[in-house]
Image (spheres, rainbow, N blue to C red):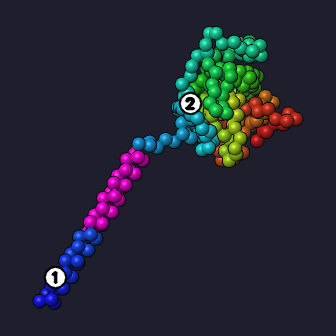
Amino acid sequence: MAGIFRAALVAARRSRRARTTAGGLASLLAVATISACTTGDVFSLQPAVDVGSQTAAVPRYSGMQTLVPSNPYMTAAYPRMDEPMAPTEQMPASEVDCRQELKRLGVVYTDLAPIHEGQCGIDYPVKVSAIGSVEMKPAATVTCDMAATFAGWTRNELVPSARWRYFSGVRTIHQGSSYSCRNIAGEGVLSEHGKGNALDVMSIELNNGDDIDVRKPGLFAFRTRGFLNNVRADGCQYFTTVLGPGYNYDHRNHFHFDIKNRKNGYRACR
């Protein structure tokens, strides 16, 4: 009789252990399931945004861009949300004088409200849509000094060079990036684009219908090669930086012009 009682007691203990183990496994499984669902829900609320290719589309983005230089075609495709300058805004005398120079050069422009984005910005930006009869597509947002420098180069060097090489005037300058808040690629230094002191030129359209792509021309494209060599060389008389095809991969499809202020008047023309 005692043997039967001990056997029944052992069986009962084994049954309780089984139920406890099963319950523990069920609880762990439930916790894991809840955790997995919660993680998935959180990530689904964070959309994937490629801020590097949409710098110009995010006028109040708080951080500096590190995925740069951005594709100039992409920054041109996402224009800024511009605000006109307030009628009561007071300009320094230097800015007033600069705008007189723009008018003398025949620059068609609009004054914009100040742009301030962290380290980036322009105190008194202008948006240039044309230089005389030469259109700027899309319109470029830059400092007045950059606009005046670019206009002087366009009128005095670019247009005469086109007439000499192609017997045609210039209809349109296709730019890929003007003001854009970003660093220089591979460096923790603010790009001149982030100050409004730079422009990237992708192609130059002539009145005769020719559209001269800035990318390195073919071996036997002697006239195009000579014209682009003139663009680079003449630009170095006006800008402190001229970088283009042949300098590095990032500049393979455009000319970068800027008016970076360097010590001892040093210029980078490559």
Front tag of 1 and 2: 1
On whether residue 24 falls in the magenta region, the answer is: yes
- Circle 2 sits in a helix, a strand or a loop, which is it? loop
Q: Quadrant of the C terminus?
A: top right
Residue at horizontal 64 percent and vertical 32 percent from the top: 118
Residue 213 in the image: x percent, y percent? 62, 36
Question: On residue 116, which mark appears?
Answer: none
The residue positioned farthest toward the top in the image shown = 88
Q: Is residue 212 left or right of residue 20?
A: right
User: What residue occupies the far front of the structure in this picture?
Assistant: 2
N-term mark: 1 or 2:
1
Which of the numbered marks, if any, corresponds to residue 8?
1
Q: Position of residue 225 (x, y in %)?
A: 70, 39
Q: Nearer the viewer, residue 169 or 239?
A: 239
Q: Which residue is mark 2?
A: 60
**42 drawn magenta:** yes
Region in magenta: 22-44
Q: Quadrant of residue 194?
A: top right
The percent position of residue 77, horizontal first and vertical second, equals 53, 32
In the rendered image, residue 38, in percent from the top left (x then y), is placed at 37, 50
Can you tell which quarter of the image residue 71 is in? Answer: top right
> Is residue 167 visible to us here?
no
Between the C-alphas of marks 1 and 2, the distance is: 76 Å
Residue that appears at 68% across and 20% down: 124
Q: Dot 2, how many residues are within 10 Å of its Cα: few (below 14), some (14-19), or many (20+)?
A: some
How many labels were placed on the picture? 2
Under mark 2, the amino acid is Arg
